[in-house]
Image: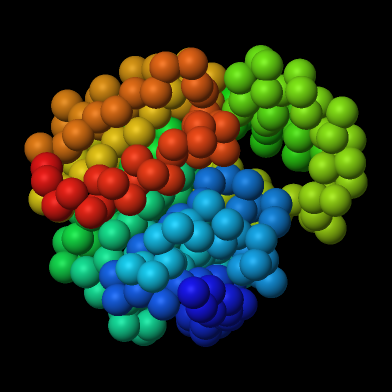
Amino acid sequence: MKKNYQNCKISIGDTDMYYVSFGSGDKKLVVLPGLSDGLATVRGKARLLYFPYRKHLKKYTVYMFSRKNKMPAGYTIREMAEDQAYVMKELNIDKASILGVSQGGMIAQYIAIDHPELVENLILAVTAPYANNVVKNAVENWIRLAKKGDHKALMTDTAKKTYTQPFFKRYRFFIPLSAILTKPAGYERFLRNACAILGFDARDELSKISCRTLILSGDDDHIVGNKAARQLNQKIPGSVLHICKGFGHGLFEECKDFYDMVFDYLQSGKR
């Protein structure tokens, strides 16, 4: 099987956007990552990122996008969605399935609302319909730590809130190394991504989403809370909700069945 790794970038306005792609299938899957993209983009990581999708690359071509490199002050989630829609059109990625994880799921909601012609299936993972109190408490603390430049504390708090306790205990010794490897030259990109989350609220427009939608969450999420997935399910017509017991915000990394659930839903063709 040809994996067809590609590390690419595309021009958008006065800047550009990094993305990676892999696979050779006719079907298209667009993946939008979470707030971690504010610290490290997908640039040059196609070989690393393809692995969870490896079983499906005969049927799918997968595209994973970072946010654009130059982000203006006050950049909103809706503007991120507009930019993502523009890039998809430029790359002739139409009627794709979109997997949005955490902040990426917030962006995906607005793409489905404002550009339904681009979205065949929507998968919203560990995300929320608005910046609830759980979201605000987590993100505001990360903003405070980033402004202080305390990267180790930022990475430690993120890991504690993301992963289950057994997983965190198992890998906690790697956090100092991770902090060294992921520390950016500055935090402007991270802060603009994070501030965009605080202003996000799509609740009044979720009824406009008309595509097939799968919502995936854990039952112990300390970043978006445990009510967020049910609220999405209640607001999005015909959506399917699957709550994975014993997992938190790191569901997409900790649950070995996560990607099988995604692709089984896409292949089923059922609401």
At a point 38% along the width and 82% down the height, the residue shown is 91
Residue 120 sits above or below residue 191 on the image? below
In the current view of this chain or complex, which residue is farthest to the front?
Answer: 1
Q: Where is residue 174 in the image (x, y as percent from the top left)?
A: 84, 35
How many tags in the picture?
0
At a point 50% along the width and 22% down the height, the residue shown is 247
Q: Residue 20: name its quadrant.
A: bottom right
Residue 194 sits above or below residue 94 on the image? above
Q: Where is residue 227 in the image (x, y as percent from the top left)?
A: 34, 18
In screen coordinates, is 135 left or right of 263?
right
In screen coordinates, is 120 left or right of 237?
right
Q: Where is residue 131 in the image (x, y as percent from the top left)?
A: 42, 31
In screen coordinates, is 17 left or right of 106?
right
At a point 61% along the width and 68% down the height, the residue shown is 46
- Residue situated in front as seen by the camera: 143 or 94: 94
Residue 168 sits above or below residue 107 on the image? above
**What colour scheme does the image use?**
rainbow
Q: Position of residue 161 (x, y in %)?
A: 62, 23
At a point 57% along the width and 38% down the height, the residue shown is 253
In screen coordinates, is 96 left or right of 83?
left
- Residue situated in front as seen by the camera: 185 or 234: 234
Q: Can residue 142 be seen in this view?
A: yes
Residue 122 sits above or below residue 79 on the image? above
